[in-house]
Image (spheres, rainbow, N blue to C red):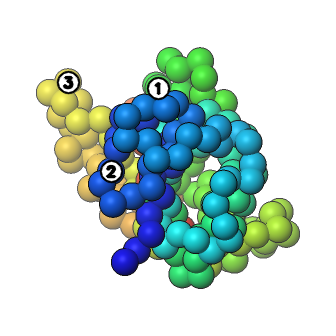
Amino acid sequence: MEKKLNMGCGNDIRQGWINLDVAAIEGVDVVHDINQLPLPFSDSSFDFVLCQDILEHLDYIPLLEDIHRILKPGGEVEIRVPHFSSRFNFIDPTHKKMFSIQTFDYFTKNAPFGRNYYFPFHFEKTVFRKIHFSKSYVFFINFLVEPLFNAGQRMRTFYEASFLSRLFPAANISVRLKK
């Protein structure tokens, strides 16, 4: 059976997972401030770590290194953060960082521009990435835009590097890194 960690879970309590949060909410299994490293887990103890909507609130590189430590070889971390064009970056005063669809590539063995030396740890590869757009009756065009801009990495890069990211601001990005 896979061992899964739901980091910074808040009210998103998942059955069969270890739910970690700073608040002692009902259903939280481990109460821990993720700013205090190391995390209270042994090396190579998880197959999967879910990290949604937390990295933008802190100095995330040391935390990402500790997530790498607690993942088993071949384990994966799934990350969701606001895209740099998201209006939520500027609304929430607790947001400290902004992210591109390629930000997390710098933590892989084949880092862009030969920058493998930036960090003492490396994930094997990025196995999934997607730019998400708000969808509602106000933003109905995003139902068409999202599949177009996620058609491949070239389209995602073109979207971010051009006026399109300002014309059609994204909401979030999600990436999955494999150890």
The residue indicated by pointer 3 is 138
Instruction: Indicate the position of residue 66 as horizontal and vertical percent values.
Output: 70, 59
* Residue type, numbered disc 1: Phe
Tell us which disc is closer to us: 2 or 1.
2
Tell me which label, 2 or 3, sits earlier in the chain.
2
Query: Which quarter shows the N terminus?
Result: bottom left
The quadrant in which residue 45 appears is bottom right
Give the crowd class for mark 2: few <14, some 14-19, many >=20 residues within 10 Å: some
The residue indicated by pointer 1 is 88
Picture layout, residue 63 above or below residue 138: below
* Residue type, numbered disc 2: Arg
Give the crowd class for mark 1: few <14, some 14-19, many >=20 residues within 10 Å: some
The quadrant in which residue 68 appears is bottom right
The residue indicated by pointer 2 is 14
- Classify mark 1: helix, strand or loop: helix
Q: Residue furthest bottom?
A: 73
Real-space CA distance between mark 2 and mark 3, rounded to the nearest whole angstrom: 31 Å
